Amino acid sequence: MRREPSMVLPPFLAAFDPGWNDPPTFSYNIQHTQATRPRNFLNKRVAFPLTGANADNAPKSLSALPSNLPMPPAAPLQTILKPVQTREEIVADSESTLKEVKDILLKIVDDSSELGNKANDIKKRIHTMEEMWRSEKLNNSIKLLMKELAYALKDDQPTKADDIHRVLMVDHIGAVGAWMPGVKQLVYHCIARSELIAIDKES
């Protein structure tokens, strides 16, 4: 490495006091450094090891895989759930349902001789219900509730029939008000008869 000699000012300049606008003096002492690292330091390639532990991690050829592997099972089709229908959406056989309801109610009336003169009034109310039913003045909810009420009386469950009667009077008073009093009398008659039978069994 070669060192440049420093520039020495003459005596008259060394003792000279520079003014405020005089350029500064420099001492030239430049060092030239020579690069010691070879130029091709990053140009070398490193071979990838294919032996030893790393050889096991190398990807295998697809031809080496067994050809008798079972096929994966097909995905099951998604089950389509049917939406739950409301009472209004249920399509009932109106005529057959009417026949069931009327036959059950009239049979109970005919089998209840203790009704006396009330039997004729109940039959008239049932006839009014039949006319409104066939003229499509009763919706499906009323028809289905009347079917449940009739079968509750047939199965000797007058309390359940009374609950259904109350629902009809509250929710559909405009449609059932003309004939429901006759059904109400029949329901109360069945309740009283059921209570008498229970008392007789206890005695």
Image (spheres, rainbow, N blue to C red):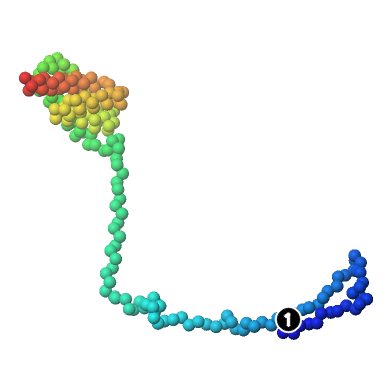
Looking at the image, the residue that sits furthest to the top is: 117
Which residue sits at x=19%, y=25%? Answer: 159
Is residue 63 visible from the viewing direction of this image? yes
Asked if residue 44 is positioned above or below residue 186 in the image, the reply reads below
Residue 100 falls in image quadrant: top left
Q: In the image, what residue occupies the spot 88% across and 70% down?
A: 23
The residue lying at 57 percent from left, 82 percent from top is 43
The percent coordinates of residue 129 (x first, y second) are: 23, 25
Q: Is residue 179 above or below residue 79?
A: above
Which quadrant does the C terminus fall into?
top left
Residue that carries the numbered disc 1 in the rendered image = 32
Q: Is residue 59 visible?
A: no
The amino acid type, in three-letter code, at marker 1 is His
Near-viewer residue (198 or 29): 29
Query: Height in image: 63 above or below 150?
Result: below
Left-right relation of 191 to 88 = left
Q: In the image, what residue occupies the spot 16% across and 27% down?
A: 157
Q: Residues within 10 Å of mark 1 (few under 14, many from 20)?
A: few
- Percent across and percent down for residue 81 are 30, 48
Q: Position of residue 160 (x, y in %)?
A: 20, 27
Residue nearest the observer in this picture, 2 or 36? 2
Quadrant for residue 102, please give it: top left
Find numbered disc 1 in the image and state the secondary structure of the residue it sits on: loop
Q: Position of residue 183 (x, y in %)?
A: 20, 22
